[in-house]
Image (cartoon, grey):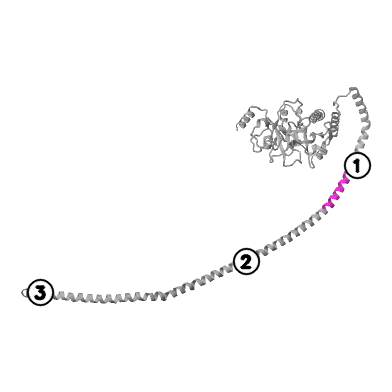
Amino acid sequence: MKTSIAFLLCISLFPGFSQGRVVRKDEAGFAECNVFFSGQVPPEGFTQPYHVKICQQYKKEPRFATLYSTKDKIPLYSAFKFTKSAQSRKENWLVEPQIDDPENDLHEMVREADIGGTVANLGANQALTSDYVGSGYERGLLNPSLLNEKDFQVATYTLTNAVPLSPALSKSWHRDIGKVVEQALIPHCSKTDLYLLAGAVPSSVKVKGKVSVPESLWLAACCDASEGWSLGLVKKASDENSLADLTVGELEKQLLRRARLFKGNCGKGKQSQEKREAVLQAVSQIRSGEQVGTKNDQETKENGLMKTVAGIIATPFIKLLELLIYIFVELVKFVFYFLWLVVKQVVGTILGGVCSLWNEMVSYLKAISMVLISIPYDVGRVIINIFLGFLEIVQDAMSLTYRILSIPVEFVLHLAAFPYHSICAIPSVLQDLASGIVGTFLLVIDASATVVHGFCYLAWHILKQFVPKGSSGD
């Protein structure tokens, strides 16, 4: 936590950190860095899941764009525009935290030494400085620092813009690309119209089993102007002195099957063949080691006069030849187009019939399969339903039998118990009857005795009233 706080303070106090960011999958192209592509449309065909789009920024301004391979741990290409030639500054190498840790809150390129433990899985998806130490390879820049000035140059020193190159190859790559851009491309296209793509083709050779060594380096240039042109250059890693020129279409075929480097093939329909030839001538002079534009003045004047005279004489014939060639080419194109339509129609009809037959066969087989599959299922379901119905019948029969049997058993038990309870009650009844008779007899006797006693008592009191008191002593 302390390291993270200190690092954030460093970012706020020192503006020398390159604020690049990984472009999300749902964002169009390279977001703010689409300005480095012709028509603001990035190359097509690079769609592998391990391809990561990076908008390289510095001081909150886009400087160039990079497509990075987390599988090979090198950039596949960097898109940039020529700013101004400048001497290389002190190298200050940076890494991209979000490539290894997408949940990290560091949304800028940072110095590897300052990261500390703030980034999880650092180096899992990108190359680090330690991968180059003692390997015999240098960190070669696809977007050369010497073609950029000031802040643009600082932003180039990121490991997401570097590939492993031998010292000799790194030196020749930066030298040749610098000369080509400055002496061959810029003289024939304004800086605002010139779009540059520098890339690498990974090989199976890996530095320390991790970082792929390029088998070749390439540069594609597009002058997107009214009289524009396009050009491709390839340098083989096995020969640092090689520098082959080719069309952008040929370069695309060497890279990927369906690659498209520039939108609309860099205005292919309006390209100036004359300017492209001038660029190729300048590239040829650079390749042969000549200084472009330095010739003997006298020889230049003589050659110029001869070329002028020859041009005046040859112009009508050249124009006529161009017309004949154009008519022949158009005729050939028409013939091939007609044959293509015929073949397309025939093949389309055949393929349509085959596809229709195949679909009908698949539907028939599918229906038969569904019927065959449903037969065991239906049979099993019927058997299960029969078994369940039989179980319900047995259950109902047992329940009915139980109910029928439960009623007579209870009745028989009560009927059998009746004589027993009746006989057992006779002694009690007789005893109660005898007790009642005796009690009644005794009650009658007692009542009779009471009546007699009452009469006697009454008679005594009557006699006592009438008998003289004198005679009572007798």
Q: Nearer the viewer, mark 3 or mark 1?
A: 3
**Sequence-wise, which precedes: disc 3 or disc 2?**
2
Q: Is residue 339 magenta?
A: yes
Query: Which quadrant: the N terminus?
Result: top right
**Sequence-wise, which precedes: disc 1 or disc 2?**
1
Q: Which residue is mark 2?
A: 387
Q: Where does the image place residue 45, in percent across and percent down from the top left?
A: 76, 41
Q: Which residue is mark 1?
A: 328
Q: Which residues are magenta?
A: 333-348
Q: Determine crowd level at label 1: few under 14, some 14-19, many 20+ residues with C-alpha closer than 10 A.
A: few
Report which quarter residue 70 is drawn in.
Answer: top right
**Sequence-wise, which precedes: disc 3 or disc 1?**
1
Q: Residue at x 27, y 76 (%)?
A: 440
Q: Nearer the viewer, mark 1 or mark 2?
A: 2
Question: Could you tell me the amino acid type at mark 2?
Answer: Phe
- The secondary structure type at the circle numbered 1 is helix
Q: Residue at x 23, y 76 (%)?
A: 445
Question: Could you tell me the amino acid type at mark 3?
Answer: Gln
- The secondary structure type at the circle numbered 2 is helix
Residue 465 has which mark?
Answer: 3
- The secondary structure type at the circle numbered 3 is helix
Query: Which quadrant: the C terminus?
Result: bottom left
Q: Where does the image place residue 6, in percent across and percent down from the top left?
A: 62, 29
- Distance in Å between CA atoms under marks 3 and 1: 187 Å
